[in-house]
Image (spheres, grey):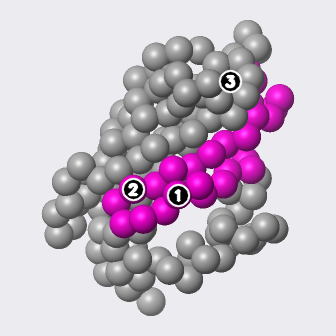
Amino acid sequence: MYTNYFNAVCKPGQSVNPLFSYLGMEIICCEPGNVILRLPHKPEFHQGAGLIAGGIIATLIDESMAHAVLASIDENNATATIEMNVRYLKAVTEGSMESHARIVQQGSTIISTAANVFDGKGTMIAQGGGSFWVGQRRA
C-alpha cells in the first residue's frame, strides 16, 4: 500500500496530488481494495446547460478506482488506467458527489475495478468500471 502517499494526500494543503488540490477531492475512506472519494461542488464543474459535466464525474470515477488499486499494491509498483467505462444514470446540478470504488478482480499485472457515484442525497448518479495495469516502478 502507498502508505506515505495516502498519509500525505489526506493532509490539508497537500501537494503530492495536484489534481486533488485543483478539484478539491478528499479521501473519505481508504483501505486495501476499497476507497471513497468526495468531490465538493464547484460552479466551475457546470457545462453550458447548467449540469455538472460528465468529464468531471468520469475523473472522480477514475481517481477513486485508481486509489483503490494504490491501496492494494506495494509502493515499488506503478499503476495506470488501461480501460474505463462510465454509465451516467442521473443528471447533477448541485451538491457534492462521492465515488465508492472497489477491486473486482486482482491479477498479477491487471486489476479490474468498479465504482458507484452518489450525489449528496445518496442517489446513485453514475457507475463505472476500469482495468489498471500494475508493474514495477521505473527508476
Residue 1's label in the rendered image is none
> Of all residues shown, which one is farthest toward the left?
107
Report how far apart the C-alphas of labels 2 and 3 lie in the structure: 25 Å
Task: Please give the residue where the numbered disc 2 appears in the rendered image.
Answer: 34
Separation (CA) of disc 1 from disc 2: 8 Å
**Which residue matches tag 1?**
29
Left or right for 48, reference 109 = right
Q: Secondary structure at mark 2?
A: strand
Q: Is 137 in front, or is 75?
A: 75
Picture layout, residue 116 above or below residue 32: above
Q: Is residue 51 visible?
A: yes
Q: Which of the image's four quarters has the C terminus? A: bottom left
Name the residue located 30 percent from the left edge and 61 percent from the top edge: 133
Q: Residue at x 25, y 57 (%)?
A: 111
Residue type indicated by callout 2:
Asn
The quarter of the displayed image where residue 79 is located: bottom left
- Residue 19 can be seen in this image: no
**First in residue order: circle 3 vs circle 1:** 1
Residue at position x 60%, y 57% in the image: 27
Place of residue 34 in the rendered image (x, y in percent of width and height, measured from the top left)? 39, 56
Q: Residues within 10 Å of mark 1 (few under 14, many from 20)?
A: few
Q: Amino acid at mark 1?
A: Cys
Span colored in magenta: 23-47
